[in-house]
């Protein structure tokens, strides 16, 4: 599945979280059978006690 991936890219400062998600994780998710899954990205978390604090 990842036989064509150059794992040296992991040491690049440009290979960040979004790269891991798109290049490594997404193919694994598809291989597991989740083809038409909507992935929620960059969801803001809200703390229940500090919602009006800022």
Image (cartoon, rainbow, N blue to C red):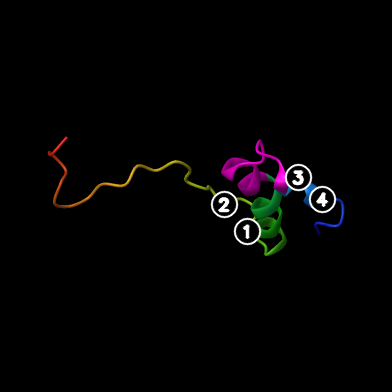
Residue 18, image x, y percentages: 59, 41
Residue on which the image places disc 2: 37
Q: Residue 41 appears at what percent x and percent y? A: 48, 43
- For the N terminus, the image quarter is bottom right
Query: What SS does tag 4 mark?
Result: loop
Task: Tell me which numbered mark, 3 or 1, is placed earlier along the sequence.
Answer: 3
How would you rate the neighbour count of disc 2 (Cα within 10 Å): few for under 14, some for 14-19, many for 20 or more? few
Query: Marks 1 and 2: CB-CB under 8 Å?
Result: yes
Alpha carbon separation for disc pair 4 and 3: 8 Å
- Reading the image, the residue beneath label 1 is 34
Mark 2 and mark 4: Cα distance apart in space: 23 Å
Q: Are marks 1 and 4 in contact (CB under 8 Å)?
A: no
Q: Which residue is mark 3?
A: 9
In percent of the image, x 25 and y 47: which residue is there? 46
CB contact under 8 Å: marks 4 and 3: yes
* Circle 4 residue: 5
Q: Is residue 10 left or right of residue 51?
A: right
Q: Residues within 10 Å of mark 4 (few under 14, many from 20)?
A: few
Q: Which mark is residue 46?
A: none
Residue at (67%, 62%) from the top-left corner?
A: 33
Q: Closer to the N terminus: mark 2 or mark 4?
A: 4
């Amino acid at each position: 599945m990842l036989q064509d991936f150059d794992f040296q890219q992991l040491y690049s400062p440009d290979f960040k979280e979004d790269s891991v998600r798109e290049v490594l994780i997404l193919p694994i998710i598809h291989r597991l059978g989740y083809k038409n899954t909507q992935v929620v990205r960059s969801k803001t978390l809200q703390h229940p006690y500090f919602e009006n604090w800022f």
